[in-house]
Structures are given as C-alpha cells and as structure tokens.
C-alpha cells in the first residue's frame, strides 16, 4: 500500500493558468469577454474549424446543437448505450426520444446498429468518440447524408484526436467538446462547439445567450447600441473569462499532455502484453489516439480474476480505477423507459462485466506508473493460485 494513493484522474494546472485567472479577476471582466474570444479563436484554429463557440459544459453544447436543429417532441435521436448519460439526457431535455444502440468490440458506436435503429422519426445521431479515439465517422456521416439525419459528434474524450488526417471538430456539421477536469484539457467546467457552417454557428451563438440578437440595433439608425431582440427562448450557456483564462493555457499545453498520455499508455501495453487475462486497448494507426482512457477487458474464461475483484484489490493497493461506462440501458430511468433484455445490447452487456479503466494522466510520475503496473501484475499473479513469490519478470518484461 502506497503512502499516497494514486487517484484515478487529476488535472494538470500550472502557474500560467493561475496567473491568467488572477488577471481576469483584477481586470474585472469575470464573465464572457476578451479571453473567451481568444480561446474560441485559438481552439477553432487548433482543430481546423471555421467557428468555435465556447459554452459552460459539453452537456450544454449538445443541448444547443439539438436546439439549433429544432429537435423536439416526436423526434428520435440515436445514442450509443456505452457512454456517459449526458448525450441521452439532453435528448430527453428537448422532449425528444433517445434511441439507444449497441457498440462494437472497440467500444465505439456500431454503424450497423445505427442503420437498424433509423426510423422515419430519426432526426440526429450522437456518435461518441470513445476513450480518445475517433469512431467510424465516415460510415456515420454517410448514413446521415443518405437518410437526411444530422450528426452531432460528442468529442468529450477526444480533443486533439484525428480522423482522415484532420482533427475532430473539422468534420461534419457540428462537434461538442468537454473541458471537465477529468478530460484531456480543462477549464474547470466548460465546453466548446465547432462548426464550419456560418448560419449554424450564428444560431448556436444566439441560443447560447438567451436567444438574443443585436443585429437589428446595429443596423438601425446609429445610436441604438442598447437595443436587442429575443428571437427565441434561448439558453444561458456562455463561458466565463475566468474559465477561458485556464483554457487558453491548457490548449497550448495539450499536445504535450497527449504525448505524456501516449507514453504512459504504451508503458502499460508493453507491461501487460503477456497477461492473457487481459484484452488491451488497440491503437488504430489511421485514427491517432489521444489516450483519454486506458480501458482493459478482463477475460473471465482464462482466469479466476474478475473485474470487480481487480478493482477491489487495486483500491486496497492505493490505485484508483473507474468503469467506462455503466451502459445507459442499465440505469433505472432508461431501463424503465426503453427496457433491457439480453438481446438488445449484447456487446455492451458483455463489455460491461469486463471493463476497468486504469489511471492515465500527465500528472502521473514515472513511479506512479510503475506502481500501477506492479499492483496490477501482483493481483493477476496471485489470482493464478501460485504460492511462490511473483517472479521479477512477471508481466513487466519490457520495463
Ligand atoms: C464528460 C462527458 C460529457 C459531459 O461533459 P461536461 O462538460 O461535463 O458536460 C459528455 N459526454 C461524454 C462522453 C463525457 O465523457
């Protein structure tokens, strides 16, 4: 047991972020001001999108995207079941119906399951780029085009990830990002929408500020700068300069963060390569990964060790873990509304019993990484019912 447990996740905030926040407090802007504009412009440039709209969370970003598509009662929106509840919740908030679909063995939403779920009421698909790697985006954008359905990408895990040589945020109509503290970059709470469509960007912006437009005042006879019109009952979704102050510096550090994440993920994969109890995450070279999650699968047949057991033993050893995710159809609200049977989501159901995410973040020291590897190997070795001590080389041949 370590003196200091290794948390499952932790942000990396430096002096630059602190100084910039202090600057916002001293200059008096606090809420949406010049730093939000700088952050939006640098984010748009980073992902390669024409427009970026900063908001107060990814959940709000998804809400605005659905609102800008005028999705409401009677409409259906397709969401993967193996994800965080935000994407399905926002569909419900709009009064529409979330249609949950299964994922593939790679945890990503399954385009075949999407196609089966499309009905005459389907208005949008919310694919999630799981764990920091792009999903099968071309197939999904193609389905959207064929059926006249919007694709609203949830890239909460995947800021900086690439697909077809472009960063996520530069594909399709609209992409939503999260800057929650567990994510690859943070603003405390915060989110971003990116789009290349100018009219859509303007609608998103209007919806993010109460549905207010100032165009009429600006166009009318000179002196009416005080004038605005409420064009629709919009949301209060704007990001504060206090948040953008953090984001500006997090974005500058992002590529370094991703490099560190990649190094740790590679270390884990080398160390665990010989453990036949585990299925390790696979990197697809054509979809550069940003390693938000390191999710292993524990294969029950080859071992006495179970996922729950591994989590318990790691906790005792001072190593934090998490499960991504409890499928949405297992939660009381969605189970009651949409049912649960072993035939509906066979892959997500099988994965759910097997998955555990290990600590992975830039603030981990090399010693932290070695301690996680050692704890995991020790627990797996002990589960094999050996009375001998764990050999030096066990599981760590490539240390
Ligand atoms: C974290 C997360 C969200 C929500 O992000 P917030 O910024 O906290 O609203 C949405 N989708 C997925 C897949 C997430 O992991």
Image (spheres, helix red, strand yellow):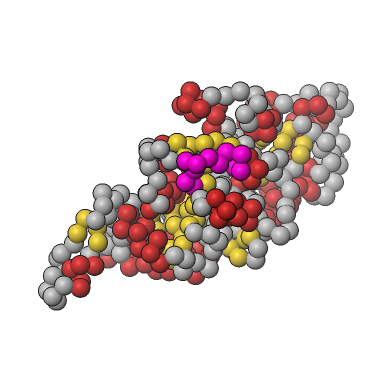
**In the picture shown, does residue 53 fall above or below 312?**
below
Is residue 294 left or right of 299 when viewed as pictured?
A: left
| Quadrant of the image occupied by residue 284 | bottom right
Residue drawn at point x = 77 percent, y = 27 percent? 300
Q: Position of residue 245 (x, y in %)?
A: 39, 61
- In the figure, residue 395 lies in which quadrant? top right
Residue 123 drawn in magenta: yes
Q: Residue at x 53, y 32 (%)?
A: 328
Q: Between residues 40 and 66, which one lies in front from this camera angle? A: 66
- Where 131 falls versus 299 (above or below)? below
Which residue is more in the foreground, 330 or 144?
144
Q: Quadrant of the N terminus?
A: top right
The x and y percentages for residue 212 are 24, 57
Above or below for 18 versus 124 = below
Query: As drawn, which residue projects farthest toward the front?
Result: 120
Residue 151 in sight: no
């Amino acid at each position: 047991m370590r003196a200091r447990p290794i948390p499952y996740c932790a942000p990396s905030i430096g002096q630059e972020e602190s100084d910039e926040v202090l600057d916002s407090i001293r200059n008096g802007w606090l809420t949406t001001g010049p730093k939000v504009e700088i952050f939006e412009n640098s984010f748009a440039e980073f992902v390669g999108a024409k427009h970026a709209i900063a908001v107060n969370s990814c959940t709000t970003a998804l809400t605005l995207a659905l609102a800008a598509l005028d999705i409401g009662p009677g409409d259906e929106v397709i969401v993967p079941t193996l994800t965080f509840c935000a994407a399905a919740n926002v569909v419900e908030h709009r009064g529409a119906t979330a249609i949950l679909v299964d994922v593939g063995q790679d945890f990503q939403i399954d385009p075949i399951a999407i196609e089966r779920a499309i009905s005459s009421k389907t208005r949008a698909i919310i694919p999630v780029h799981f764990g920091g790697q792009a999903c099968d985006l071309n197939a999904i954008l193609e389905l959207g085009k064929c059926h006249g359905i919007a694709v609203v990408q949830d890239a909460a895990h995947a800021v900086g990830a690439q697909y077809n040589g472009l960063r996520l945020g530069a594909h399709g109509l609209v992409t939503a990002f999260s800057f929650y503290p567990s994510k690859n970059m943070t603003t405390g709470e915060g989110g971003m929408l990116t789009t290349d469509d100018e009219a859509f960007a303007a609608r998103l912006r209007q919806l993010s500020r109460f549905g207010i437009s100032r165009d009429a005042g600006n166009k009318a006879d000179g002196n009416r700068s005080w004038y605005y019109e409420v064009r629709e009952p919009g949301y209060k979704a704007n990001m504060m300069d206090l948040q953008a102050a953090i984001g500006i510096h997090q974005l500058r550090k992002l590529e370094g963060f991703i490099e560190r994440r990649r190094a740790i993920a590679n270390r884990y994969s080398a160390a665990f390569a010989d453990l036949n109890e585990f299925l390790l995450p696979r990197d697809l070279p054509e979809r550069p990964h940003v390693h938000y999650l390191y999710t292993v699968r524990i294969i029950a047949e080859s071992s006495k060790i179970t996922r729950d057991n591994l989590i318990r033993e790691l906790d005792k050893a001072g190593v934090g873990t998490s499960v991504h995710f409890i499928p949405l159809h297992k939660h009381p609200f969605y189970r009651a509304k949409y049912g649960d049977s072993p035939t509906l989501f066979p892959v997500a159901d099988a994965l759910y019993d097997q998955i555990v995410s290990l600590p992975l973040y830039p603030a981990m020291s090399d010693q932290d990484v070695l301690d996680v590897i050692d704890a995991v190997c020790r627990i797996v070795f002990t589960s094999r019912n050996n009375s001998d001590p764990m050999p030096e080389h066990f599981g760590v041949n490539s240390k």
